Every structure is written in structure tokens, then in C-alpha cells.
Image (tube, helix red, strand yellow):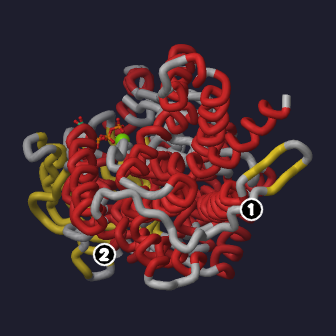
Amino acid sequence: MLKINNIEVFYHEVILALKGISLEVPTGGVVALLGANGAGKSTTLKAISGLLRHENGKVAQGSIEFLGERIDHRSAEEIARMGIVQVIEGRRVFEHLTVEQNLKVGAHLRGNGATIRNGLEAVYRYFPRLRERRNVVAGFISGGEQQMTVIGRALMTGPKLLLLDEPSMGLAPLLIKEIFEIITRLYQEEKISILLVEQNAKLALAVAQHAYVLESGRVVMDGPSEQLRENPDIRDFYLGLTDLGARKSFRAVKHYKRRKRWIT
Amino acid sequence: METFLQLIITGILVGSIYALVALGWTIIYKCSGVLNLAMGELTLLGAYVCLAFYTWGFPFPVALLATLVVGFVLGLLTERLFLRRMIGQPVLAVIMITAGLSFFFRAVVGFIWGTDTRVFTPQVFPTEPVRFGKMVLGQVYIWSFLAALVLLVIFVAFFQYSRWGLSMQATADDEMAALSLGVSAKRVYALAWAIAFMAAGVGGTLLGNINGLNISVGHLGILVLPAVVLGGLNSVPGAIVGGIVIGILQNLSGGYLEQLTPGGVKEIAPFVFMVIIMLFRPYGLWGWEKIERV
Ligand SMILES: Nc1ncnc2c1ncn2[C@@H]1O[C@H](COP(=O)(O)OP(=O)(O)OP(=O)(O)O)[C@@H](O)[C@H]1O
Ligand SMILES: [Mg+2]
């Protein structure tokens, strides 16, 4: 479904963020993208969704194909129209809109009333909590609910490929579990293909069938999830199964930005 | 007491016109972060367009509708021709472009319509004043208020319920997230300009009906700035309330302080008020600060 062929990405014409990355997402599959801070995970997603150019970034080499068409020179709007949606890291809800209005903006490209109503129903079925909170301004709901809102909002676009950037970031373990169960259901029931960026490798390898490991802009390893789970390096650095403490330090670096919540 | 009440009520009526223009400022600022220094000239242009339609013999409501349509088109055009290429450039540069636009539009108006004061002839609204008890209100104020009110309600409903209205608010909140959902920022900016043109045009027209129409209607743009700042620059309800507050303030200072001074209090009072408010509430009464991300 998605095929990235040896792309190089520059920011501001000079900062080389991706140094030749190739990866593939099969139709109906879940693929995980692992890596430490600054490895280039988000940059990869932005290159796919076309948001890159709005951060003054550019795909300088290689190609990105979606359903057989090249998309690396298309605008974010065109790419969204083709059925790719990125959930940006950091739970970026529209803070002054209600939960339901947030979801409605997700249906921006789909227009008519019936599609929106059905879309809302579907989202509320996956996230019953959002139905209760539908009329609350999104800046005031909890972090978990905000994560649900941004995933629900992405679903409202009717995507074929969902790019999820660190959905577990800064959430309590119980909530993370809930969100990952829903992600699993999304590809099983809705047949949405998913490219999942995570620092929580354990979780990611549990849902994904295949995973890639990025390190400073390069793919350093890839394979089926079971295989990676057994790999000693992965066990050391990403699963924290030895006492190197590496995972702890990744966590510490991870900038979880607390949001100021004040409105009107 | 009657004078006081009368001043307050007239203030609210005129304030509703200010609210329209303030909304124009706000919507552009909110969506694109640009302070549009040509706001006054948009009111001027709109007012003259309406006058033109009216003098050609169209009934006033039709002329007003035509002004809205022309304003919409001019807004899209202005954004496309002058501001589109500035996307991604420093905000200050864009603001300078709007300063340039203000001179440009002013020249266009002077070139086409001259600088003499024009009035809507025949009078659009009946001149017979209406009495409520001891209060006397000109009909032109009442009708202007109603027209402004209808338009404000339509705009607010548009922002709250329509697809593009919501997408505009979304872009104001988080442009990147809106882009990720396929909302075109370019179209949002264009729409913001179109709406600003429409609101300003109607505001200018109504004011032109009250005071007569000449270049000075363009001062309305700057006059309303305190209302916008007061409302917090990016809050639509704030702009509306701010506009009305400025209307009242202006009337009260005109009524009570004018005879004590050589004149001009009416024009200055809103700015004095703005400075005082800014001292205590730098983000205005309803403004929200954009949440900064490192
Ligand atoms: N807008 C930008 N301008 C310049 N450089 C950038 C920009 N965004 C990212 N980079 C750089 O590109 C590299 C990859 O960043 P990216 O955000 O893709 O990392 P990441 O793997 O998502 O990390 P994290 O886990 O912290 O989210 C980093 O070195 C970063 O400094
Ligand atoms: Mg990232």
C-alpha cells in the first residue's frame, strides 16, 4: 500500500534528518517504527503526509508511493484526500472547540451531513467516553480523552492509512492499554492500515506484524515483530529487559510538554 | 438620567457597527496572525461600493447584498494577489503589506469617487425620530443596529456550525493539526479576508448613512482597534462586546466631557480606555494566548 524508497529529507535545505530510508506498509497491516529521540520517526511520518513542507522540510531524494502513485510532491491536502491521515504527536486537539466540533473538522473533506453523522457514530462506538464528553471544550478534557479525540478526529477523515505518532506518550498505563486495544480493533474491523511510531517498543511490537528501527536518520534493523522481540539489542535498548537502564533514560529525555489549560 | 440612558442606548446602537468592523480585524488576526492595517480602507471601499449600487437605482437591501458579494470577491482577490505569496514570511512583513494596501485602497477610492462628502440620496432610512418615553432615537441608528445584528448572528453561526467556519477556528487553534486533516490553510486565509471585507463593507455603509460618506469613514478602522484589543484580538465574542463597549464609551465621553474640553475627547476616549485595560490585562478581556510549543 505504502512504499518508501530510499528517501532523504532536509529541513531548511541544510539539516539532513533522514539519510536514505526505505520501508513498506502492506494493505491491512500494522507496521511499527521504533527509535530513540531525534531518530527521525516523526520526520518520516511528515514526509508521507506532506506536512513536512509546512515545517520547511523537503524530500530531496528517493520516492514515496501510495497505492501505486507517487505522492512525495503532493500537498498535504491532496495526500489527505487520497486517504492518508497523520495523528501528530502530542495530542494536538483544537483546544477552543468542543470534542464533537473537533471530530467534525476531521470530516472536513467529506462534506455531507449523513457521512458526518455516521462517522460520529462510529467514533463514539470506539470511544464511548467521547460521547459523554462531546460538548466539552477539548482544552479541558483529560490527556487520555484528548488522545482519543485526535485519533477519533483522524478516523473521521475516512482514512486508508493511519499514521500514528506516539499515541502512548505521557499517558497512564491503563489508558495506554485501552488505546492500544482500540488501535488493534481499528485494523481488524475497519481494515485500516497503520504505521505506528512508538518509543514504547514492547507495546508496538505487540500490535505490529512488522517493525523498523531507526537510528539517526537510517533504518538499522527491520523484521517481523516476533523476530525483533527476540533480538538481544532490541531487548537491551528498547524493551528494557536487561538492567542497562537505557529505556529509563529515553523516558527521561522525552519531552512531554505539559499544556497550559486556560480558555476563553 | 434620561440623557445618560439615551447616551448608553445610542452607544450600543453605534457600537454594533463597530462590532462588525472589529470582527473583521479579529478574524484575520485569529486565522493568520496578521494585524490588517488596511481595515479602515476596507470599510471605505465597501461603503462606496454600496453607494454606487444605490445611486444606480437598486433598492438599499439589494445594494447591501451586492456589497457583501463584491466584498467577498474583493477579499478573495486581495488575498490571492497580495498576501498569498507572503505565506511563511515574517508576520511583520505581511503587516507592512497591509499598510501598503491601505494606501492603495485609499487612492483607489479617491480616484474613483473623489474626496467630497457624499450622502445616500434619497435618504435610505426615514428621518422621523422614534420616541421611547423621553428618549429620542434616530431611525437610522435603529435600522443600522438591526442590520449589524443580523450580520453578526450570521457570522457567529457560520463559525460555530458550518464546515468552513469550524475549519477556520481549527486553523486558528492549531494550523498543523488542521493541515493534517486536509484543511487548506490558503483557503482559510482567503475566507478570512473575504469575511473581513464583507463585515467592514457593511459597517462602512451603515456609518456612511449616519454621518455621510467621505474619506474619514476610513478612520473607523483605527477607531475600532481599541475594541479589538479590548476583546483580546482573537476572540470573536470579545470583538463584538469590545465594539459595543467602545460605542458606549465614545458616546458618554462625547456627552459629558466634550463641553469641558476643546474637543476631540470622543475620538481619544477609546484609546485611553484601551491603554488602561492593557495595563491590567495584556491579552485583553477575552483573549487567549497561543499555547507555545518548544
Ligand atoms: N522543524 C524542524 N526543523 C529543523 N530540524 C528538525 C525539525 N524537526 C525535526 N528536526 C530534526 O530532525 C531530526 C529528527 O527529528 P524527528 O522529530 O523526526 O525525531 P523523532 O524520531 O520523531 O524524535 P522524538 O522521539 O523526539 O519525537 C532531529 O535531529 C531534529 O532535530
Ligand atoms: Mg517524534
Question: In this rendering, would A24 be left or right of B165?
Answer: left
Question: In this rendering, would B191 be left or right of B261?
Answer: left
Quadrant location of the N terminus of chain A in the rendered image: bottom left
The image quarter in which residue B90 lies:
top left
Q: Which residue is mark 2?
A: A66
Q: Which residue is mark 1?
A: B128
Please state the horizontal and vertical placement of residue A69, each as a whole percent of the image: 25, 80
Label 1: which secondary element: loop
Residue kind at label 2, given as amino acid type: Phe
Camera-side residue of A253 and B108: B108
* Measured Cα–Cα span from mark 1 to mark 2: 70 Å
Numbered circle sitting on residue B56:
none
Residue located at (26% from left, 68% from top): B112
Residue located at (8% from left, 42% from top): A14
Residue located at (75% from left, 42% from top): B9
Please state the horizontal and vertical placement of residue B140, each as a whole percent of the image: 66, 59
Q: What chain does mark 1 sit on? A: B
